[in-house]
Image: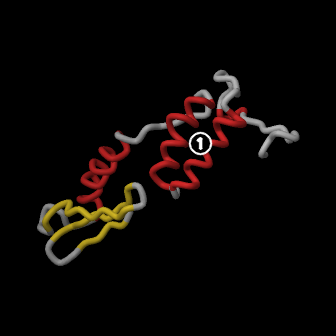
Amino acid sequence: MCYQRTIYTVNLRYYVDGKQKFITLAPKNDLYRSWNDVEPLIERVLGQLNSHAEIVTGSIGLIDYVEKHYLPWCQENKAAVTANSYWRVWGTFFRGVSQTDGVANLRCDRSAHSPC
């Protein structure tokens, strides 16, 4: 986040999903002259952004996390061959992991058939 004050406006620059966003918060005038005047505007904008973020905790089941969060993220952010490989590895080696195992408790034992 970068607070920027230009000649005529007070602006906010921030990143969402790796893309830079730039918005005008307020005109430069007697009402918005210092950081203390602008800070509530910044908090309101960032609060709206953060309210849409989904929080994933360590108590979520492994299958739910991988299939609903991680693998869809890979589809959007990784090369197609990489994402497809991740899906294939998940289905082949790890799909049988118990749903009650939390992400925080994940362990991988080295064996002849394990890719870890």
The amino acid type found where label 1 is placed reads Trp
- Location of residue 62 (image quadrant): top right
**Residue 29 percent across, percent down from the top left:** 12, 68
Q: Is residue 101 left or right of residue 31?
A: right
Left or right of 38 on screen, residue 30: left
Label 1 packing within 10 angstroms: few (<14), some (14-19), many (20+)? some
Q: Position of residue 69 (x, y in %)?
A: 51, 39
Q: What kind of colouring is applied to the model shown?
A: secondary structure
**Residue positioned 24% across, 66% down in the render:** 11
Q: Which residue is mark 1?
A: 87
Pick the front one: 39 or 24: 24
Q: Secondary structure at mark 1?
A: helix
Q: Vertically, is 25 above or below 99? A: below
Residue 88 screen position, x and y as percent: 63, 42
Q: Which of the two residues, 8 or 73, is positioned nearer the viewer here?
A: 73
Residue at figure coordinates x 32%, y 65% from the top left: 13
In the image shown, does 37 or 18 lie closer to the viewer? Answer: 18
Q: What residue lies at 72% left-to-right and 36% top-to-bottom? A: 93
Asked where in the image residue 89 lies, by quadrant, the reply is top right
Above or below, 20 relative to 102:
below
Q: Residue furthest bottom?
A: 7
On the rendered structure, is 5 left or right of 30? right
User: Residue 101 or 98: which is nearer the viewer?
Assistant: 98
In the rendered view, would you say 77 is above or below 12? above
Residue 31 place in picture, x, y as percent: 14, 61
Q: Who's the residue at 56% across and 34% down the image?
A: 65
